Image: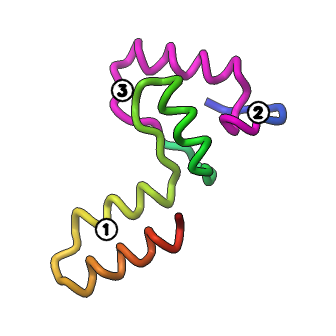
């Protein structure tokens, strides 16, 4: 999906797109929604509440991938540091 006009600060996308996204999630049975642009914590919460599934941005997706692949304690600590710096 793509938002053409200025989005709502609560969701980063417009209220109509939130409803459209929620319907799409229900139709497809999606477990997670990924946004290409950064989301604020409040926006993530509001979107999760509206859609009923987890919503993440690209940076959080990258951290999830690295977390799954991390084998050493040092790598895990670096990922945790990056996550805390992001939050």
Among the two numbered marks 1 and 3 on one chain, the one whose residue lies closer to the N terminus: 3
How many numbered circles does the render carry?
3
Label 2 sits on a secondary structure element that is loop
Outermost residue on the bottom side: it is: 74
Q: CA distance from mark 1 to mark 3?
A: 22 Å
**Horizontal and vertical percent for residue 13?**
70, 33
Q: Secondary structure at mark 3?
A: loop
Q: Quadrant of residue 27?
A: top left
- Disc 1 is placed on an element classified as helix
Q: How is the image coloured?
A: rainbow
Look at 60% across and 44% down and name the residue there: 42
Residue corresponding to mark 2:
8
Percent position of residue 62, x then y? 41, 61
Q: Nearer the viewer, mark 1 or mark 2?
A: 2
Picture quadrant of residue 5 = top right
| Nearer the observer, 12 or 42 | 42
Verify whether residue 34 appears in magenta. no
Q: Residue furthest left?
A: 71
Residue occupied by mark 3: 30
Q: Is tag 3's residue or tag 2's residue first in the polypeptide sequence?
A: 2
Q: Which residue is mark 1?
A: 66
Residue 11 versus residue 65 in the image, above or below: above
Magenta part of the chain: 8-33
């Amino acid at each position: 999906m793509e938002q053409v006009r200025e989005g709502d600060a609560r969701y980063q996308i417009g209220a109509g797109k939130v409803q459209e996204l929620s319907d799409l999630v229900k139709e497809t049975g999606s477990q997670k929604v990924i946004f290409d642009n950064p989301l604020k914590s409040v926006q993530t919460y509001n979107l999760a509440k509206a859609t009923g599934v987890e919503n993440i941005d690209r940076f959080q997706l990258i951290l999830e991938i690295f977390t799954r692949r991390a084998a050493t304690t040092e790598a895990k600590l670096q990922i945790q540091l990056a996550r805390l710096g992001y939050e």
